[in-house]
Image (spheres, rainbow, N blue to C red):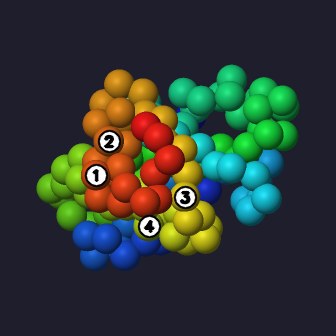
């Protein structure tokens, strides 16, 4: 199951980024954790976390599908993990998220590492 929501961000000439946001809204009073799924997966990888009321009451979860996955698409045929990291930071910008924890599963871990390298002041941990 891919993300059912998308937003447009400017990187690579315009990326349609697929995402899921816990409780269907961003609550600036709570910390946020950005989740990047592994290769050949979608935001559905984090189904159990999104259904954990104790967790979603304590923090925002923002799962983002990397380039080439799920509902995320762009006009460029060629992209890298760096491009997915830039896209994820731009998704954070869209929601006004200044700083977040970042968790990536498998190759998603390489993407959140790149997020931290690109914007160390915006990623609390990875």
Other residues around mark 4 within 10 Å, as few (<14) / some (14–19) / many (≥20): some
In depth, the one of 123 and 45 nearer the eye is 123
Give the percent coordinates (x, y) of residue 104. Answer: 43, 34
Q: Which residue is mark 2?
A: 113
Instruction: Name the residue at 54% across, 27% down.
Output: 45
Q: Label 4 near label 3: C-beta < 8 Å?
A: no
Figure quadrant of the C terminus = top left
Other residues around mark 1 within 10 Å, as few (<14) / some (14–19) / many (≥20): some
Instruction: Name the residue at 47% across, 41% down.
Output: 125
Give the SS element for disc 1.
Answer: helix
Question: Separation of disc 2 and disc 3 at Cα?
Answer: 15 Å
Give the percent coordinates (x, y) of residue 54. Answer: 84, 30
Q: Which residue is mark 3?
A: 99
Give the percent coordinates (x, y) of residue 38. Answer: 39, 30
Q: Which residue is mark 1?
A: 117
Question: Separation of disc 1 and disc 3 at Cα?
Answer: 14 Å
Of labels 2 and 4, the one closer to you: 2
Other residues around mark 3 within 10 Å, as few (<14) / some (14–19) / many (≥20): many
Q: Earlier in the sequence, mark 1 or mark 3?
A: 3
Q: Does residue 43 appear in the picture of this structure? A: yes
Question: Separation of disc 1 and disc 4 at Cα?
Answer: 15 Å
Q: Label 1 near label 2: C-beta < 8 Å?
A: yes
Q: Which residue is mark 4?
A: 90
């Amino acid at each position: 199951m891919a993300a059912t929501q998308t937003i447009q961000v400017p990187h690579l000439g315009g990326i349609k980024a697929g995402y899921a946001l816990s409780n269907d809204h961003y609550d600036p009073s709570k910390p946020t954790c950005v989740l990047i799924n592994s290769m050949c997966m979608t935001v559905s990888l984090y189904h159990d976390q999104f259904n954990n009321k104790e967790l979603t009451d304590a923090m925002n979860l923002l799962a983002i599908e990397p380039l080439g996955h799920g509902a995320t698409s762009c006009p460029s045929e060629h992209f890298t993990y760096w491009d997915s990291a830039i896209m994820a930071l731009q998704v954070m910008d869209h929601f006004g998220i200044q700083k977040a924890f970042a968790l990536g599963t498998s190759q998603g871990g390489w993407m959140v590492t790149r997020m931290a390298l690109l914007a160390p002041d915006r990623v609390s941990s990875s």
